[in-house]
Amino acid sequence: MASSNSLMDSLFQRSLEDLIKGIRLHLLGESSFISKSVDEIRSEIKLTDLSTKSIALQKLSYLAALHGVDMSWAAFHAVEVVSSSRFGDKRIGYHAIAQSFSDQTPVLLLITNQLRKDLNSSNEYEVSLALECLSRIGADDLARDLTSEVFTLLGSSKAFVRKKAIGVVLRVFDKYPDAVKVCLKRLVENLDSSDPHILSAVVGVFCELTTKDPRSYLPLAPEFYKILVDSRNNWVLIKVLKIFAKLALIEPRLAKKVADPICEHMRRTVGKSLLFECIRTVLSSLSDQESALKLAVAKIRDFLVDDDPNLKYLGLHALSIVAPKHLWAVLENNEAVVKALSDEDLNVKLEALHLLMAMVNEENVSEISRILMNYARKSDPLFCNEVITSLLLACSRNSYEIVVDFDWYLSLLGEMARIPHCQRGQEIGHQMIDIGTRIKDVRLELVRVSRSLLIDPALLGNQFMHPILSAAAWASGEYVEFSKTPYEIAEALLQPRTSLLPPSIRAIYIHSTFKILVFSLRGYFTAQEPISPPLVQESTSSGSSAVNCFTYKSISSLMNMIELGLRSLSGTLDVEVQERAKNVLGFIGMIEHEIAEKVTGQDNETAVSSAIVFMEDVFSDELGPVSSTAQEKVPLPDGLEIKENLEDLQEICGEFLKPIFESNSNTNSFSASDKISFSVTKLSIRDQQEASSSSSPPPESASLLAEHRKRHDLYYLSSQKKDEHNDSNGNNNTLNEYPPANEISGDSFNPKKKMNQSKPRPVVVKLDEGDDDLKTKPNASSNDEPLSRAIQTALMGKGMGKEREKDNHEKILDSGIKEQSSGKEKKTKKKNGEKSSKHRSRRRSDKEASAAKPVEIVDFLL
């Protein structure tokens, strides 16, 4: 009865084609249809018929790949399908395993014997399926158990099988480095194969291995050199060139030997891919070979003038490789680089932009900036902002080291702000403030640029410009003494369109207005005699003119204008804006009467004039730049050791950290609003009592706390609410504090001297000097990896001398591989009986021996 049900299920089972058609017919209810299909697959895959099970698994694999259905629950059924004798079922099973298995799959070890069986099969297609599956899911145990089978297949007479076995070696070496002792010899022997497919596969494997640790493969340079000279397969040559690009950086003598064959390939090849790889190898690793470098640069020029945007991009990319060491190659092709900025392809334009940035120095920064700004104005928003970002980064690098004329650079920042597509307001505003705080000589120009930005009403509606306007408003108020038109700046700060700004920036506007008012009043009260004309700009036949004098009329106009502009803000919903507006209005109301008294001739010092002097003193402190790493540079006290989990805190003050439950006195139980607090007050009082009392010895926890507080008193808050405290003798001592974070040492004011400058470069306050020491050092060499040690042992372990010839090299490889069987037996015994301590000490000795021996290249190659 059960067999008849199984037969009926298989007869009416839907195939993969039926499932796909059903999904297309149920586009609206696709998820529900897929859920029903998965339930159907669950019932089908449990049947004993392998054909039915394989079709169900095939449908599940499709749903997992395209619709993200979980198929981890079918892992055991996939193993069952793989064991089928039918090739079609086996292929479905292996595909499902490769698609869903991972190192954590519980049934992973169940396929070891099946993989071994299929790897030893006489059917090359079954062997191919097993090899492909092993390359996908080869875990540590699988790689270890199947190394001998892979070793056998590396010498297979069937090129189809051997090619795939070579590819599997990458996975096996990665998961089981000891496989190098078994398989490396045969892998090296395949470098002499005449079959182009096998040669391509083995060179590809070594190309990947060399990328991870090139030093271990230096002894194979003769074999790679032979392929470089004899091979005519472009793809094989490309991989060999990648290998030599890595090896030549380690062994400088190798560059001179391979330069000639690489130049020969560049002259005769017509393949653009091989030509570009030759160029890249020369530029990155053989740049010291002058003849090869000149030939490569000449070939780059052919790429740059090509109409194909892909080749043009490759030419620009090649120039970006050579630019750091040989900038002359870029300068020779500067016309082509500038022309590429107008290319239709965005990638070409970006690469040309990066090249121009590599050419920037203090002599040509102005000209390059002018060119790029012209392209930014007529470009799309994306490229426009890339240009602006590149200019900002290049000019601000190393404390603006390439900027000589900061007046010009501030004008450039103002031009950037007026570009319609500019979205880098945050960076521009930050640099305006940064330059103002670092360079004193440039503050006059900063105020001029800020004024031109503030009086432009078109910028207020652009949200990307708000950070720039914020910086301009701050600079106008902070450095108002450099302004020729304070009234005009205050009028711009209070114009009605400032309502478009967010409240945080409007608060800065109001505060800057306050600074301008205080500065103007101070100038008015210190005047010795009436002066005219007034401060307010008046229209004349020659245009607008501004003067630096303060009169009653000008001050009255300024105060009336400020009062009119801020009165509407005194009732705003934002408390910051409201408070600042009321502060300014209150200050104006306090001084209006005193201004009138000065007009009548009463020049006596009053409380209000003193208040104005006091407010000017408040704003007179210059704000300096603060290093981003200022806190990191504060030295730690000797002996300070703080653990991350602060477990010692419980031992020191455990009795004081007990929770205190505060409940309602009228009830016996705790209510929901009960609070838990810690007796910090008790801790402070108890500490003082224990410290002052000498009659009885303090508890251990209190003594530890007192000792810790004595050693690190700086990190404790004062127990009193005073700035000063009395010592044991009754003397009044001020608490010690660290100096301000923006305090700058004298060494920071030593800019580099620029020669032959028409205008001396202003002093730039530099911060973060010496930060290079804080950078993380590079990690240890990859030679410490198990695979690298295994490769070095196999290739350079025994008999690797400086005077070795090629024949001797092959004999040494043979003798090293012949020991694989005995080594394997010893390794098995070691795993079963001995402990890992001896193994680790042996590994360390091997590592030290390999590190002590320098890598040598055989003499006949060099």
Image (cartoon, grey):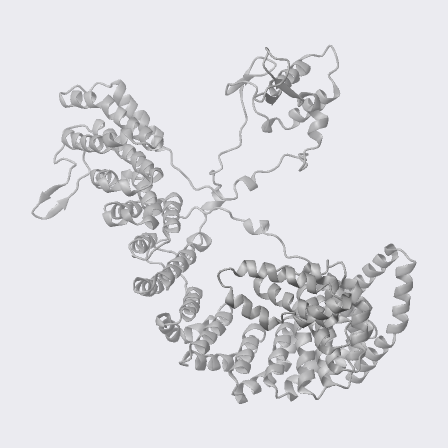
**Image quadrant in which you'd find residue 233:** bottom right
Can residue 380 be seen here? The reply is yes
Extreme residue toward the left, this view: 541
User: In the rendered image, which quarter contains the N terminus?
Assistant: bottom right
Question: Residue visible at 29% across and 27% down?
Answer: 582
Horizontally, is 91 left or right of 490 in the view?
right
Q: Quick one: 235 or 75, which is closer to the camera?
A: 75
Give the residue displayed 61% in from the left and 21% down from the top.
680
For residue 109, what is the image quadrant? Answer: bottom right
- Along the viewing direction, whichever of 609 and 462 lies nearer the viewer: 462
Q: Is residue 151 above or below residue 43?
A: below
- Residue positioned most to the front: 1
Q: Is residue 676 above or below residue 191?
A: above
Where does the image place residue 540, in percent across and percent down from the top left?
8, 44
Q: Quadrant of the C terminus?
A: bottom right
Where residue 771 sits in the image (x, y, percent)?
A: 55, 49
